[in-house]
Image: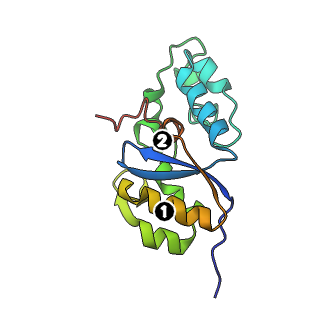
Amino acid sequence: MTTHHPTTRRLVYGHAQMQDCLAFADANTAAEEGGEIKALAAARTWGEARQVQMTHLWNPAGPDYYEPEDGYADDKPFKINEVSAVAEGDWPPMVTERAFKLLPKDVQAQFGKREFTVHNGDILEIPLAQEAELVAELRQRGYEVTRDDDLINVLDGRSFSPLVG
């Protein structure tokens, strides 16, 4: 029998508002990923957007996707929701799908349920009511767990998501 070994023991979690459930991220990289998302969202021109350096994520406005000669000149005003990957809900990746990689399988089964979304695949839906019990279980297993709702929602692209009505 093979057991699933999560990639990190340091987790940040919070209330993902778009799916109204708990979501988890790797605390070792979450703040840097959040910074990448904020940097792209803050770009004022396509030139700035193209130059945003991504270490953890891919840049959906980058030169591989949008060329100046295709009408995306460096000085053209940039709005993140004009990026097709963002408009389609593919970027940033849904924060609620990370639990599949970060949480042990038995914990996933005990506290959450796999839900299919029309946007981009499955999410692990963990009810907010499970928070105390789930966090206690993870800490008992040696996880370092910190709550940061703002960061979780930044990772989910909540501030600019076209899915937010």
Residue visible at 64% across and 37% down? 31
x%, y% of residue 156? 48, 41
Rendered-image quadrant of the C terminus = top left
Which of the two labelled residues, at mark 2 and mark 1, occupies the earlier sequence position?
1
Q: Say left or right for 26 vs 106.
A: right
Disc 1 is placed on an element classified as helix
Name the kind of residue labelled 1 in the image: Leu
- Label ID, residue 31: none
Please give the count of numbered marks on the rendered protein: 2
Give 97 or 110, whichever is nearer the viewer: 110
x%, y% of residue 32? 67, 37
> Could one spot residue 58 in this view of the protein?
no
Residue 45 is drawn in which quadrant?
A: top right
Give 102 or 85, whichever is nearer the viewer: 102
Give 84 or 44, whichever is nearer the viewer: 44
x%, y% of residue 6? 65, 65
Disc 2 is placed on an element classified as loop
Residue visible at 59% across and 35% down? 34
Residue at the farthest top position:
75
> Could one spot residue 90 in this view of the protein?
yes
- Crowding at mark 1 (Cα within 10 Å: few <14, some 14-19, many 20+): some
Name the kind of residue labelled 2 in the image: Asp
Residue 7 is drawn in which quadrant?
A: bottom right
Mark nearest the camera among 2 and 1 is 1
Give 110 or 4, whichever is nearer the viewer: 110
Q: CA distance from mark 2 to mark 1?
A: 21 Å
Residue indicated by mark 1: 134
Residue indicated by mark 2: 156
x%, y% of residue 62? 62, 32
Q: Say left or right for 42 vs 115.
A: right
**Position of 150 relative to 70 (above/below):** below
